Image: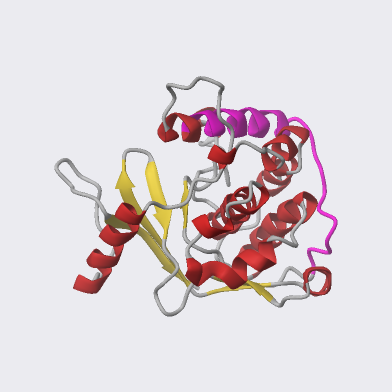
Amino acid sequence: MLKLILPVFSKLTVFRSRKFWWHSIIMAALVSCASPSIDLKDSGKISGNLMIFWVGEDRFVYYPYNGDPLTYHLPEKLRQDLSVSTIRPGLHYTDGGSIPPLVRGLAGLSPWGYGPAYIVHDWLFAAHHCLFTGQPGALDPRDEDEAKTVSRVTFKQSADLLAGVISALIKQNVVPKREAAPSAIYTAVDSVVAKNLWDKTDPKSCDPVTKEDLDRIRRSTEKGIASVQVLRPGAVPPLLVFQQRF
């Protein structure tokens, strides 16, 4: 979402520089606190199948085309505000939660501790950047309806949606209740720095999954995948490295 202004930087460098800023935000959030503008007593519900593929060094893809994709059933306030009842994240690159290594040992602050929440939030940013920079056609056409939903999501709502998914995961007993982690994460994604990332106008902030990566994932799914595959020396992408059903 953030690209340093050096023409020789690759997309991978863009991805890593974005992670640097998210790390800074999380570290600052640990010493502050913010609250969502939605009632977390009505947090909605998560359902479906979460599938993450490794496609190369530091490159992971959320793949929704499995018949029962990850879906967030919205709480009442967000249903009314967005005029939809669900958000189904589309195809996009993800790194889970961009949690700095220094704090990953703290309860609730691992990169995949709240995996579905990070997938929903990453999708909102990925689709927003393509829409905001005038490149809606860069998104997979199967995600057209979901992109229309994202076009109505504000920055503040993107943070509220992440908070809602975390709350839903806790209520569904998928993850344990934590005191500090959800507030720190929400504070980070609702920060001024995060807002600046949301408002980026650089066309390169639209980073859709390449046709090559998508074709490789499609071919691997057509062969049939029985279980999560292990990243090991000599492993050849794409590999299904994370899967969870809700």
Q: Residue at x 67, y 44 (%)?
A: 185
Q: Residue at x 23, y 66 (%)?
A: 219
- Nearer to the camera, 2 or 224: 2
Q: Is residue 176 left or right of residue 220?
A: right
Quarter of the figure with the N terminus: top right
Q: How is the image coloured?
A: secondary structure
| x, y percent for residue 225 | 24, 69
The verdict on residue 77 being magenta is: no
Name the one closer to the observer, 63 or 3: 3
Out of 33 and 194, give the one closest to the viewer.
194
Which residue appears at 57% of the width and 56% of the height?
Answer: 123
* Residue 157 screen position, x and y as percent: 77, 56
Question: Is 30 colored magenta in this rendering?
Answer: yes
Residue 224 in percent (x, y) is at: 22, 73
- In this view, the residue in front, 226 or 169, is 226
Boundaries of the magenta span: 16-41
Q: Quadrant of residue 26?
A: top right
Q: Position of residue 226 (x, y in %)?
A: 24, 71
Horizontal arrangement in the rendering, residue 177 relative to residue 232 (left or right):
right
Q: Is residue 171 left or right of residue 95?
A: right
